[in-house]
């Protein structure tokens, strides 16, 4: 299970920032053959290694639960893929690399005693508060459901598309793991597919919450078996007792799975309220009346999602006198794939102006205690919104530019990119040594489309 190129070196115990215990499972990825490499050589190329190394740390900076990157080592080994490439090794960390699939495999072999042992290990080390509950396995499922829902909501809020959401790539801790053909949205397109081997769009951006729930249902099956005590059923027991799920188990599992939708929605709405500057007030229809109409306009024009959300931070100040609003909307048009030089641009601009004046502004007045002319308040509001909407994200073309620089011998450029995507992801002003990376907030170049 897991990536055949990865091997765990061991667990490192420690303490977290609040004085509690923590542990890190340290892995090497790309160091050579492992017991799980099957027919592969176990090596990784620089291209995929740079992408994973940067993505994990970037996602952490964006507030998304994720594995972490400790080190990236370039090697002189030539690795044969579609073409010959130089190799690399990523040292990556997670509190645990146990996956949903880790439970499915022994269950498929009807080794429910191993399922129970793995569940007990997971609870003991990662969910210790559940250890002494008689219904601890049902509670474990509920916790995993909740953590997964929160993570997927954060993916959707930042515009992250994973690309390979099979159960083997789903963390029992709700972390984002195994960065393969991932991508961040450029144009806002809910049907965006980042994996060229997924032509049917099973893992399309809009499908991620549904797929996550489906994967949780797969995890629920082996956990239901040990809730039922099937590993403790005697050999002489009836076949029905060995295979049928008890009604009370069905009820407990269903209740845990049904929590996904509510947790996901609550977290997504919380995040989007903050991105829209609705920081201290909450209306029950914020998602349907404020957020979704804006996203619908972005989808219609294929507007750059990250750019539009960052530009939204300026709207509260602009609405104070309305004089620059049309210029603002023109900026959105310039970053919209379906509107540049399009006859429909005037109609779309009119609709966007109407949204700002008739939907967003009235809602903002409630946030500003009915005053949206207090410049000091609005300037502070803009600063707070910018902390929720990154300026720099690891777009595919940005990652490719970094990789090409590495291929040309600029290996230390990875350090600059890492600093930009972590320390300065939300900043307007970059230090002098990163000034040449400002273009990474710009439009997608023709070669990167």
Image (cartoon, rainbow, N blue to C red):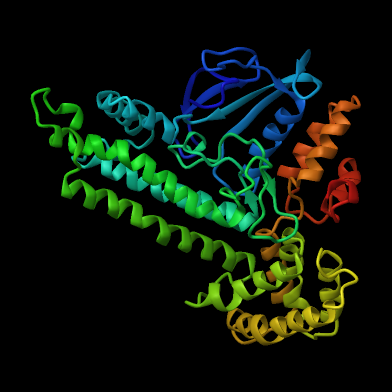
Where is residue 434? Give x, y as percent. Answer: 86, 43
Where is residue 428? Give x, y as percent. Answer: 81, 56
Rendered image quadrant of residue 353: bottom right
Q: Which of the pair 380/313 is nearer the observer?
A: 313
Q: Is residue 404 above or below residue 269?
A: above
Residue 54 is at least partly visible in this image: yes
Decide if residue 300 is on the left or right side of residue 287: right
Rendered image quadrant of residue 385: bottom right
Where is residue 115? Give x, y as percent. Answer: 30, 28
Residue drawn at (36%, 56%) of the image: 259
Q: Is residue 178 above or below residue 87?
A: below
Residue drawn at (66%, 80%) of the image: 360
Decide if residue 278 is on the left or right side of residue 75: left
Query: So how many labels did they put on this image?
Result: 0
Q: Is residue 80 above or below residue 246?
A: above
Decide if residue 99 is on the left or right side of residue 133: right
Decide if residue 235 is on the left or right side of residue 124: left
Residue drawn at (16%, 44%) of the image: 246
Q: Which of the pair 167/24 is nearer the observer?
A: 167
Rendered image quadrant of residue 380: bottom right
Where is residue 239? Give x, y as percent. Answer: 14, 32
Q: Which of the pair 160/93 is nearer the observer?
A: 160
Q: Is residue 37 above or below residue 126?
A: above
């Amino acid at each position: 299970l897991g990536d055949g190129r990865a091997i765990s070196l061991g667990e490192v115990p420690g303490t977290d920032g609040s004085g509690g215990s923590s542990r890190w499972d340290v892995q090497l990825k790309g160091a050579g053959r492992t017991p799980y490499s099957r027919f592969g050589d176990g090596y990784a190329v620089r291209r995929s290694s740079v992408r994973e190394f940067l993505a994990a740390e970037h996602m952490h900076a964006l507030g998304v639960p994720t594995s972490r990157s400790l080190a990236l080592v370039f090697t002189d080994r030539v690795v044969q893929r579609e073409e010959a490439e130089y190799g690399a090794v990523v040292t990556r960390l997670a509190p645990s690399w146990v996956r949903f699939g880790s439970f499915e495999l022994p269950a498929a072999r009807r080794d429910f005693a191993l399922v129970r042992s793995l569940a007990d290990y997971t609870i003991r080390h990662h969910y210790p508060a559940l250890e002494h509950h008689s219904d601890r396995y049902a509670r474990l499922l509920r916790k995993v459901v909740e953590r997964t829902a929160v993570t997927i909501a954060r993916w959707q809020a930042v515009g992250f598309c994973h690309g390979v959401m099979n159960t083997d790539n789903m963390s029992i801790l709700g972390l984002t793991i195994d960065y393969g053909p991932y991508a961040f949205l450029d144009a806002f397109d809910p049907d965006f597919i980042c994996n060229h081997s997924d032509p049917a769009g099973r893992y399309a951006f809009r499908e991620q919450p549904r797929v996550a729930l489906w994967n949780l249902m797969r995890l629920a099956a082996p956990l239901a078996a040990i809730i039922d005590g099937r590993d403790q059923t005697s050999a002489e027991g009836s076949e029905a007792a060995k295979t049928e799920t008890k009604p009370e188990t069905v009820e407990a599992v269903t209740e845990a799975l049904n929590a996904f939708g509510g947790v996901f929605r609550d977290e997504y709405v919380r995040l989007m309220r903050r991105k829209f500057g609705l920081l201290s007030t909450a209306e029950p229809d914020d998602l349907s009346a404020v957020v979704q109409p804006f996203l619908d306009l972005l989808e219609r024009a294929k507007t750059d999602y990250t750019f539009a959300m960052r530009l939204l931070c300026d709207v509260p100040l602009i609405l104070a006198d309305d004089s620059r609003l049309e210029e603002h909307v023109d900026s959105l048009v310039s970053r919209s794939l379906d509107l540049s030089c399009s006859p429909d641009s005037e109609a779309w601009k009119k609709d966007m102006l109407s949204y700002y004046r008739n939907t967003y502004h009235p809602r903002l007045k409630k946030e500003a205690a009915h005053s949206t002319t207090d410049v000091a308040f609005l300037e502070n509001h803009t600063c707070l919104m910018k902390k929720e909407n990154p300026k720099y994200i690891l777009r595919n073309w940005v990652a490719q530019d970094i990789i090409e620089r590495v291929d040309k011998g600029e290996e230390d450029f990875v350090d600059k990119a890492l600093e930009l995507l972590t320390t300065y992801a939300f900043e307007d002003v970059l230090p002098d040594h990163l000034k040449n990376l400002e273009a990474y907030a710009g439009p997608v170049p023709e070669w990167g489309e």
